[in-house]
Amino acid sequence: DSGVTQTPKHLITATGQRVTLRCSPRSGDLSVYWYQQSLDQGLQFLIQYYNGEERAKGNILERFSAQQFPDLHSELNLSSLELGDSALYFCASSALHGGTSVGETQYFGPGTRLLVL
Amino acid sequence: QQQVKQSPQSLIVQKGGISIINCAYENTAFDYFPWYQQFPGKGPALLIAIRPDVSEKKEGRFTISFNKSAKQFSLHIMDSQPGDSATYFCARVHGNNRLAFGKGNQVVVIP
């Protein structure tokens, strides 16, 4: 168990809908990262937050957004969903200095499997 | 975005054998090269990592070797066990500690 929790575990929804994925980082970790895993694209970095502030953006669509709250949990919002958004979404966290340090271990949650029908 | 390229895509190894996965990268200006292990239905977990100023790192049955001139690093799993059957991802670290993963290699260890 990595100490990172994600809810829900599974999500089935329809095209055009909006969903929210939730992540609680390991106790004390200030950095949260979101990744998407699909068969064709592999594991791709979406976005990073550090202590409530956005730090880095990757291949995140404009229909997607995220935030990190004062209690450090994070939410990833996916809107106007398309079939191609079906994927596993992982949240990871790293320790206190994750905003500036390179090489800190990222601890991944169990993921949320999203199916868009 | 620069990629890391893994080979082979999948690997079947006899129990007790050596699994070798290679990863090529394009740019040397990175500080950290981790390997992640992922079991079905689970999130990736850090297995072992190396910095480019080190040519080899060993942790138990897992060894990373780094070849800077060839821009390649490899994961060796010695005495492979059925419990090692998983997907292995090499990665490189961008600024802000974000990871760029390779496509992954599925390793199947048969008894």
Image: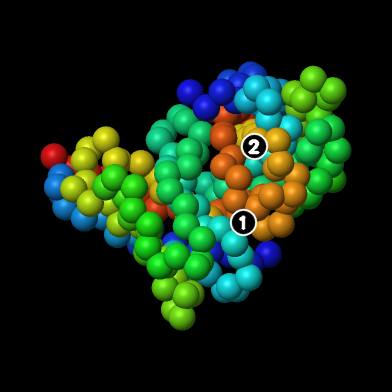
For residue A16, which quarter of the picture?
A: top right
Q: Which residue is mark 1?
A: B93
In screen coordinates, is A113 left or right of A62? left
Q: Can residue A53 be seen at all in this image of the molecule? A: yes
The amino acid type, in three-letter code, at marker 2 is Ser
- Res B72 label: none
Q: Quadrant of the C terminus of chain B?
A: top left
Residue at x 78%, y 49% (from the top left corner) = A56
For residue A6, which quarter of the picture?
A: top right
Chain that bears disc 2: A
The amino acid type, in three-letter code, at marker 1 is Val
Q: Which residue is mark 2?
A: A94
**Disc 1 element:** strand
For residue A3, which quarter of the picture?
A: top right
Residue at x 27%, y 47% (from the top left corner) = B61
| Cα–Cα span, label 2 and label 1 | 13 Å
Q: Percent x, y for residue B45?
A: 48, 38
